């Protein structure tokens, strides 16, 4: 482990944390790596929350004369941070320093040294107990971080099986600290109900921090609630020579071109069940707002960035001016005007405004739901592609359409339904209530949505139902209008279509931008008034 050129450097890329215990342990591990790295320069940087950043660490290496830099993810498993965020940082560094060879290492994964360390933590926990319990009467409760990547979650399941079989536990219960299910408290409750004499709770985490503290607190709760079960808290991996050696091994593999990522089951490269639409998704870093957050919080507070107003194309703006002057709009509620006028723009017909039906508060509910849930589900791709990309990106709203989802195809074939209806059922299964639903093509999609709402308690935040056609269209819209359980926007008759549904959502996004600006104005006025008050009045 000790060789290497003086021009060779290693950047250990940590996630970052608001917990000072986590940062102290990470930096202690970096020092251990430095001690074992020989002549190689070793720096560390954080992806988010803490300083220095990964870019600052790399810059320090370059300033120190490094011509070859290996960036090693200081994370256990390959999920979004290792697959998207950190590679995005590396690409930016390669462009900034073209004279330097940058290499990206694989995450630590289930390295044999880490398996040995996990075994050691379990044995240490057992040794701290006064009771001697056969492992066949014990259940290993393995707690992973939990991600939206099934590949990483699957590695936790693999680790659980390897430790169970390798150490002879009678059972293993997987749970996660967030994002994936079951959550820690649910997993502990399930394990405690199975009749085991002992539960050994093992956090598969590198360092202490907010999440590990919550895991131990949950273990204490179940121990108090279930006194007949002994609950042991095993240590996390922590600062250990095995961890340092794995990091140095990953750095060497990166330089040698042997950094093996698990691409076989990577949802960004191959179609994984339930994640098919993420194949080829661009590497977009999601952590920029919290990069170096701890250092920025210590500085004088900067003015919060203002929301940029929606600026229409000049032709669009002129069209909206003509529409605004083209009839008496005072008969409509003000909160409906953006939707109505933009629907007139899309249809080319002032009468479209008279056809539209809003349930009470639907426009306001939909607009706020876009800001809160940040997800729009559509029945067909034409509605999805009709949504204004600029507004989606500004507001951070994701879109999803299930009509071409492989499971929707299987569902349609096996249950005798249309693919659009199957896509609506998939959305209900995948996302629950946190969405705005926009239907612009398929009456069967409305029928399936209203059935799920009435019979299965589904509560999307807003349903926009504006399909076009003559077969079942009128009936489905009437059915939606009578569906009192959810906010809804629809019309009567056969007119509508994907552009109409997309227009309604676009109008709500325009209103959402205006609402954000108005809230910022109110906050700014309040701050100015507070500063203008005499000191004695403030006291």
Image (cartoon, rainbow, N blue to C red):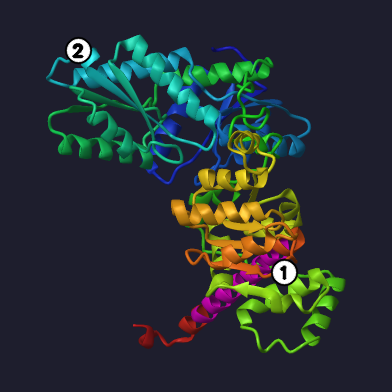
Residue 145: horizontal and vertical position, in percent?
Answer: 43, 34
Marker disc for residue 310? 1
Residue range (magenta): 502-526
Q: Magenta span has 512?
A: yes
Residue at the spot x=78%, y=79% of the render? Answer: 350
Q: Tell me: residue 352, above or below residue 467.
A: below
- Residue lying farthest to the right in this orientation: 315
Label 1, label 2: how many angstroms apart (C-alpha)? Answer: 66 Å
**Quarter of the image that includes the C terminus:** bottom left
Task: Please tell me in which quadrant of the rendered image residue 176 appears.
Answer: top left
Residue at the spot x=76%, y=70% of the render? Answer: 311
Q: Magenta span has 386?
A: no
Residue 461: horizontal and vertical position, in percent?
Answer: 52, 61
**Residue 206 can be seen in this image:** yes
Q: Tell me: residue 58, above or below residue 523.
A: above
Q: Secondary structure at mark 1?
A: loop
**Residue 74 can be seen in this image:** no
Q: Secondary structure at mark 2?
A: loop
Q: Which residue is mark 2?
A: 134
> Magenta span: helix, strand or loop, mainly?
helix
- In the displayed structure image, the side of residue 367 where residue 167 appears, left or right: left
In front: 469, or 50?
469
Marker disc for residue 179? none
Few, some or many C-alpha atoms within 10 Å of disc 2 (few <14, some 14-19, many ≥20)?
few
């Amino acid at each position: 482990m000790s060789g290497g050129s003086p021009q060779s450097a290693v950047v250990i890329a940590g996630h970052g944390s608001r917990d000072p215990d986590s940062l102290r342990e990470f930096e202690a591990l970096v020092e251990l790596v430095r001690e074992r790295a020989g002549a190689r320069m070793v720096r560390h940087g954080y992806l988010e929350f803490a300083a220095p950043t990964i870019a600052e660490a790399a810059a320090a290496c370059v300033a120190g004369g490094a011509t070859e830099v290996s960036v090693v993810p200081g994370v256990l498993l390959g999920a979004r941070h290792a697959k998207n965020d950190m590679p995005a940082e590396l690409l930016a560094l390669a462009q900034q320093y073209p004279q330097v060879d940058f290499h990206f290492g694989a995450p630590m994964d289930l390295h044999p040294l880490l398996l040995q360390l996990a075994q050691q933590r379990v044995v240490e926990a057992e040794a701290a107990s006064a009771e001697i319990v056969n492992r066949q009467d014990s259940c290993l409760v393995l707690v992973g971080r939990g991600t939206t990547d099934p590949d990483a979650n699957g590695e936790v399941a693999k680790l659980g099986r390897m430790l169970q079989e390798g150490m002879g536990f009678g059972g293993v219960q997987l749970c996660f600290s967030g994002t994936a299910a079951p959550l820690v408290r649910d997993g502990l409750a399930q394990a405690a109900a199975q009749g085991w004499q002992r539960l050994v709770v093992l956090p598969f985490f590198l360092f202490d921090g907010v999440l590990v503290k919550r895991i131990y607190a949950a273990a204490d709760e179940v121990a108090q609630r279930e006194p007949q079960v002994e609950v042991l808290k095993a240590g996390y991996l922590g600062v250990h020579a095995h961890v340092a050696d794995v990091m140095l091994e990953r750095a060497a593999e990166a330089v040698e071109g042997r950094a093996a990522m698990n691409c076989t089951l990577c949802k960004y490269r191959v179609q994984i069940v339930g994640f098919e639409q993420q194949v080829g998704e661009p590497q977009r870093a999601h952590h920029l707002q919290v990069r170096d957050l701890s250092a920025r919080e210590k500085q004088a507070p900067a003015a919060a960035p203002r929301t940029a107003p929606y600026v229409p194309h000049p032709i669009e703006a002129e069209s909206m001016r003509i529409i605004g002057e083209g009839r008496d709009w005072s008969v409509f509620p003000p909160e409906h005007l953006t939707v109505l006028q933009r629907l007139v723009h899309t249809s080319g017909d002032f009468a479209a405004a008279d056809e539209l039906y809003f349930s009470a508060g639907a426009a306001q509910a939909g607009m706020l739901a876009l800001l809160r849930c940040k997800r729009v589900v559509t029945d067909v791709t034409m509605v999805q592609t009709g949504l204004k990309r600029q507004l989606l990106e500004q507001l951070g709203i994701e879109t999803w359409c299930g009509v071409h989802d492989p499971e929707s195809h299987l569902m349609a074939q096996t249950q005798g339904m249309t693919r659009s209806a199957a896509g609506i059922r998939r959305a209900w299964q995948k996302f629950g209530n946190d969405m705005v639903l926009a239907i612009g093509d398929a009456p069967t999609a409305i029928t399936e949505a209203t059935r799920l709402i009435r019979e299965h308690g589904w509560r999307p935040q807003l349903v926009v139902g504006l399909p076009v056609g003559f077969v079942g269209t009128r009936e489905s819209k009437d059915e939606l209008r009578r569906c009192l359980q959810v906010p809804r926007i629809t019309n009567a008759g056969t007119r509508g279509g994907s552009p109409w549904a997309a227009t309604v959502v676009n109008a709500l996004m325009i209103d959402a931008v205006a609402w954000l600006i108005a809230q910022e104005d109110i906050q700014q006025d309040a701050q100015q008034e507070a500063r203008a008050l005499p000191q004695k009045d403030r006291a």
